[in-house]
C-alpha cells in the first residue's frame, strides 16, 4: 500500500465533488453535489484556495483545503486549514497525517507564518494534530457571528 498526496486540478472535480459532499454530510449538512461542484469549480477557477488530495495506491480517498489569510500582528501571511477529510474506509492508514504534512510543507515552502485550524471538541483527530506538532490555543476564545 502506498500513500501519496498531490495538488488537485480541475480534472479531479468528479472525485473532489464526492469527497466534499461526504465531508459536508459528515458535518450534518444535506447532500448537494451540484452545489459542491459549483463551489469547487469556483475555488479552482479563482485560485483562492489550495486543495490537495490524499491517495492510497493512486485512488483519491481524502483532501485538505487551505485558505490564505494574514496575521496583522506578525505582519505575515498564514493559511487557514479549513477542511480535512478522509473517507471512513481509509481512516487509520496515515492519509490524514500525509495530508497534514503536505499542508505543513506547502506552508513552509511559501514562507507563511503557519497554519490555523478549528475543530470540534469531540473530534478524535486532535491526537493526530498534536502528534504532528500542532498546539492547542488555550489563550483565547473563538467567536462567530451569523448573518440573520
Image (tube, rainbow, N blue to C red):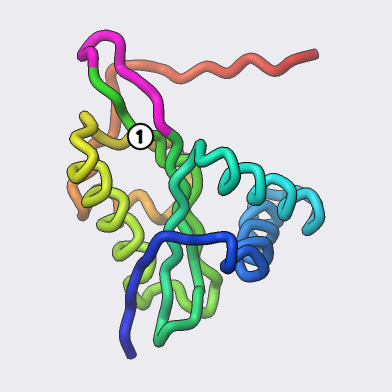
Q: Nearer the viewer, residue 13 or 121?
A: 13
Q: Residue at left 57%, top 38%?
A: 46
Number of numbered labels in the structure image:
1
Within the image, what quadrant is residue 88 found in?
bottom right
Q: Which residue lies most toward the top here?
A: 73
The residue singled out by tag 1 in the image is 79
Q: Is residue 86 above or below residue 123?
A: below
Q: Quadrant of the N terminus?
A: bottom left
Q: Is residue 61 above or below residue 100?
A: below
Within the image, what quadrant is residue 21 found in?
bottom right
- Give residue 95's position: percent from left, percent from top: 37, 70
Residue 80 is left or right of residue 16, and the answer is left
Residue 98 is left or right of residue 32, and the answer is left
Q: Nearer the viewer, residue 14 or 92?
A: 14
Q: Secondary structure at mark 1?
A: strand
- Give residue 82's position: percent from left, percent from top: 48, 40
Q: Residue at left 50%, top 73%?
A: 61
The stretch of residues the image draws in magenta is 68-75
Q: Residue at left 74%, top 48%?
A: 38
Q: Residue at left 44%, top 72%?
A: 91
Residue 131 inside the magenta-drawn segment? no
Residue 99 is left or right of residue 146, and the answer is left
- Give residue 16's position: percent from left, percent from top: 60, 63
Count neighbours of disc 1 (C-alpha within 10 A) and say few if under 14, some if 14 to 19, many if 20 or more: many
Residue 73 inside the magenta-drawn segment? yes
Q: Is residue 98 above or below residue 122?
A: below
Q: Quadrant of the C terminus?
A: top right
- Give residue 14's position: percent from left, percent from top: 67, 69
Q: Is residue 39 above or below residue 16?
A: above
Q: Nearer the viewer, residue 99 or 88?
A: 99
Amino acid at each position: 500500500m502506498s500513500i501519496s498526496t498531490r495538488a488537485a486540478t480541475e480534472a479531479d472535480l468528479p472525485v473532489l465533488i464526492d469527497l466534499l459532499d461526504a465531508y459536508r454530510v459528515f458535518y450534518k449538512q444535506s447532500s448537494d453535489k451540484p452545489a459542491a461542484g459549483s463551489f469547487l469549480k469556483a475555488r479552482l477557477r479563482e485560485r483562492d484556495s489550495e486543495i490537495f488530495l490524499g491517495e492510497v495506491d493512486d485512488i483519491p480517498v481524502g483532501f485538505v483545503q487551505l485558505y490564505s489569510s494574514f496575521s496583522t500582528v506578525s505582519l505575515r501571511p498564514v493559511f487557514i486549514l479549513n477542511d480535512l477529510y478522509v473517507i471512513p474506509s481509509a481512516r487509520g492508514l496515515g492519509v490524514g497525517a500525509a495530508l497534514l504534512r503536505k499542508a505543513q510543507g506547502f506552508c513552509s515552502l511559501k514562507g507563511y507564518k503557519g497554519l490555523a485550524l478549528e475543530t470540534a471538541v469531540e473530534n478524535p483527530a486532535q491526537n493526530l494534530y498534536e502528534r504532528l506538532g500542532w498546539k492547542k490555543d488555550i489563550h483565547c476564545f473563538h467567536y462567530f457571528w451569523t448573518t440573520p
